[in-house]
Image (tube, rainbow, N blue to C red):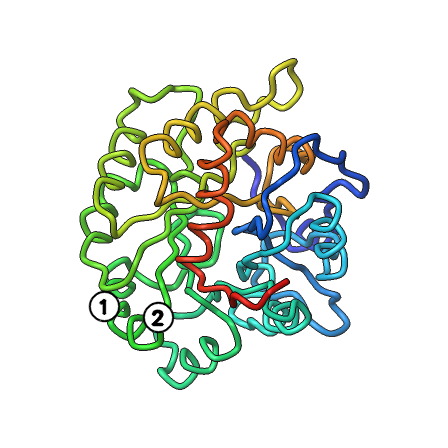
Amino acid sequence: MTATTNQEAQIPIRTYLESPSSPGIKLPRFACDSHVHVFGPTGRFPYSTDRKITPVEAPKEKLFALHKQLGIERCVIVQSVIHGFDNSVVEDAILAGKGAYLGVALVPATVTDKELHRLADVGFRGVRFNFMRHLLNDASIQQVIDMTPRLKAVGMHLQVHFESSLIHDLGPLLAKSQVPVVIDHMGRVDARKGNDHEDIQVLFRLLENKLFNVKVSGIDRIDAQAFIENPYASGIAIARSLVERYPEQCVWGTDWPHPNHTHIPDDGILVDALTRMAPDPKLLEQVLVLNPQRLYRFSSQVS
């Protein structure tokens, strides 16, 4: 693969559909999209100079409109490496969301306790660390674990994003965390290899420990076969296995606006896939409403 040049990184990339389909499913009240990002507007929130790509702006107004179309009432916005450690773009969206939108911050391991308290006070419920070759990370796993007592002091959890092969080494260390651990995108396993693959089996074993939670987001990332009659079937199968085995430890998200992807997913299709991931209405409410309420502590006054 040819390395991306600085000039190439400046070319805006479209990562989301302007007009996604509307889902056929009606989601339960207070359904939560637990994994999205916002980009820009760059006039107020400049992109990080360390970014590898430049996505087309995806501001909070487009996110709010999408959620209205999809029937989603709550959301957790995850700070992206596109904006680096300046979490102000997510903070702005949290404020505009009036309690229905919360956040997960991106911070260095050296972040001060004062800043962690400030982030918690404005609606950030966790911090995310990436262990992906293409994403920003300045911390070792041991530094991250050593930080968890400080996260516990402010009521935050730990969110981790890693390449699937790393689960074997990271899992035992993450089990030492003093706060809940949320695993992004089903551990980025290759769904086409099926439930018996060693990476997926380790993910299942980790979830036997109630410390761990998993985002059953990314069916389109772990199975990128979008242009077939039955798209993401393998990804849906892995997600369903996780939901059925660990119903109280799963949350779901669209991952809008889909950065660093192989294709542009249709968000309406991603929502409709929930009927196959959690076919029982009570299971669907568990994943979309009850689990996010517990993990992110939304205000009960949201209407």
- Disc 1 marks a residue whose amino acid type is Asp
Quadrant location of residue 181?
bottom left
Q: Is residue 61 left or right of residue 119?
A: right
Determine whether 24 is above or below 76 in the image: above
Q: Could you say whether the residue bearing mark 2 is in a helix, strand or loop?
A: loop
Q: Nearer the viewer, residue 289 or 34?
A: 289
Q: Nearer the viewer, residue 142 or 292?
A: 292
Q: Residue furthest right?
A: 19
Q: Position of residue 201 (x, y in %)?
A: 26, 29
The residue carrying pointer 1 sits among few (fewer than 14), some (14 to 19) or many (20 or more) residues within 10 Å by Cα, namely some
Determine whether 184 is above or below 108 in the image: above
Q: Could you say whether the residue bearing mark 1 is in a helix, strand or loop?
A: helix
Determine whether 211 is above or below 50 in the image: above
The residue carrying pointer 2 sits among few (fewer than 14), some (14 to 19) or many (20 or more) residues within 10 Å by Cα, namely some
**Residue at left 77%, top 72%?**
43
Residue contact between numbered discs 1 and 2, judged by CB atoms under 8 Å? yes
Q: Quadrant of the C terminus?
A: bottom right
Among the two numbered marks 1 and 2 on one chain, the one whose residue lies closer to the N terminus:
2
Question: Which residue bears the numbered disc 2?
Answer: 109
Task: Identify the mark at residue 236; answer none if there is no mark.
Answer: none
Q: Is residue 124 left or right of residue 53?
A: left
**Residue at left 58%, top 29%?**
273
Quadrant location of residue 197?
top left
Count of residue discs: 2
Q: Position of residue 1 (x, y in %)?
A: 54, 34
Q: Position of residue 257 (x, y in %)?
A: 66, 48
Q: Position of residue 77 (x, y in %)?
A: 56, 59
Question: Which residue bears the numbered disc 1?
Answer: 146
